[in-house]
Amino acid sequence: MSHTPEGKPGTVRPGGRTARTRTAVLAATRAELTDTGLARMTVEKVAARAGVAKTTVYARWRDISGLIVDLLSELTVRTVPVPDTGSLEEDLRQLARGLLELFRSTEDLVMFEAIFATALHDREAREALSAFYAFRLDASAALVDRAAARGEVPPGTDRLEVIRTLSSAFYYRRFISGEPVTERDADRAAAVAAHSARAGLLVAPPA
């Protein structure tokens, strides 16, 4: 049975009942991911938990992939708190500790695992995931801009690569090796990123 979405998944006018429906459905999606996992989640279960008709979910989001895409869209527009302590290394350490809290949240981890799994086979989910991380990288890299203005890093330092250097250890341990991530790991990742940036190892190559 095929269902034709109204534009992209979750594309609706904000406000009123439409906004309440979207909020309820996305909350139900997160809850279903945590309680049952991606493999056993269905549109019918999400609709029942949200208290809406399954036809509403099918018409607006199309399928589970559409729900995952819209869930990412919601995450993307959230304000990202970026540390501003006056020190690059301390800013990176606090950012790393915040990332550590994310990786310790069962609900957040289950949600991101489902998002990554969906992105492997769904083009819209892949694009939404790329947009999400581009947004997060750009927002977090503001602390590198401030460090550059203070003269803590050489001119031409790749602001995004500093954040990638910090976060790569987290994603490798969680999604590749399966190792736990500790406070020591978070602090070391921050120190490595700060040292690499100050030493000029993350200067962008000439265009």
Image: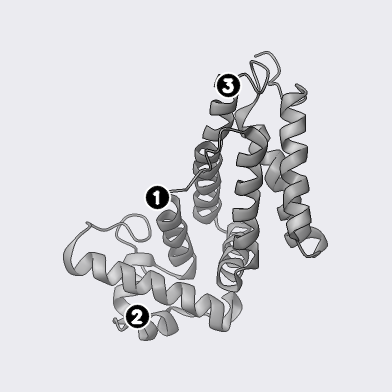
- Residue at 50% in and 39% down: 139
Q: Are marks 2 and 1 in contact (CB under 8 Å)?
A: no
How are the colours assigned in the image? one colour
Query: Which residue is label 3 attached to?
Result: 150
Type of residue at label 3? Arg
Marks 3 and 1, how far apart at CA = 29 Å
> Relative to residue 122, is residue 15 drawn left or right?
left
Res 50 label? 2
Mark 3 crowdedness (10 Å alpha carbons): few <14, some 14-19, many ≥20: few
Res 77 label? 1
Mark 2 crowdedness (10 Å alpha carbons): few <14, some 14-19, many ≥20: many
- Residue at 78% in and 65% down: 180
| Residue furthest left as drawn | 16
**Image depth: mark 3 or mark 1 in front:** 3
Q: Position of residue 120 (x, y in %)?
A: 63, 58
Quadrant in the rendering for residue 183: bottom right
